[in-house]
Image: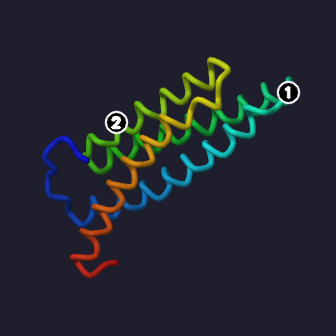
Amino acid sequence: METHKQHPMTVKQAICAYAQSEKVKSGLIWICQIAEQVAVMDDPGRQQGAAVLKTLVQMVGDESDLAARITGDHRWHEIGKKVNLALVMIQSGVPQETGFHLTQALTRVTCIGGRAAAVLQENGLF
């Protein structure tokens, strides 16, 4: 599924990547659940829900950016782009449309976390 050559991951990078992947995965799942709830709300609850959702999306995007910086893995930027597209959907008033982008982000995060777990397992740390 990955389209570019993977570089070897150090144990330190694997630890950081695994921790960040778990954090980002949780956030993405929360966003999907909240987006579905916000989509069926009436105003002003919908506006308040969208405001909370925007904050959560921005936090998850920031965690993805942090992961890219601390691991040196540019695939995190792809995840950040998907999260930003979800934010655009929320800001456009269609939170129910975030699922497509968030599912793509979740798939990418799962790949990174799986690779990190394999490196940790190979080194007897998992």
Q: Residue furthest bottom?
A: 124
Q: Position of residue 83 (x, y in %)?
A: 48, 34
Q: Is residue 86 left or right of residue 65?
A: right
Secondary structure of the residue carrying numbered label 2? helix
Tell me if residue 114 comes above or below residue 74 in the rendering.
Answer: below
Amino acid bearing label 1: Asp
Label 2 packing within 10 angstroms: few (<14), some (14-19), many (20+): some
Q: Which residue is mark 1?
A: 42
Q: Position of residue 124 (x, y in %)?
A: 26, 82
Q: Which residue is mark 2?
A: 77
Secondary structure of the residue carrying numbered label 1? loop
Amino acid bearing label 2: His
Q: CA distance from mark 2 to mark 1?
A: 34 Å
Q: Could you say which quadrant of the image residue 118 lies in?
A: bottom left
Tell me if residue 122 comes above or below residue 8 in the rendering.
Answer: below
- Looking at the picture, tell me which residue is in the foreground, 23 or 104: 104
Label 1 packing within 10 angstroms: few (<14), some (14-19), many (20+): few
Q: Is residue 35 left or right of residue 67?
A: right
- Residue 116, which numbered label? none
Q: Residue at x 29, y 42 (%)?
A: 75
Q: Residue at x 28, y 76 (%)?
A: 121
Q: Are marks 2 and 1 in contact (CB under 8 Å)?
A: no
Q: Position of residue 73 (x, y in %)?
A: 26, 46
| N-terminal label among 2 and 1 | 1
- Looking at the picture, tell me which residue is in the foreground, 92 or 40: 40
Tell me if residue 122 comes above or below residue 104 in the rendering.
Answer: below
- Between disc 2 and disc 1, the foreground one is 1
Q: Could you say which quadrant of the image residue 113 lies in?
A: bottom left
Figure quadrant of the C terminus: bottom left
Q: Is residue 14 left or right of residue 97?
A: left
Q: Position of residue 60 (x, y in %)?
A: 52, 42
Q: Residue at x 74, y 40 (%)?
A: 37
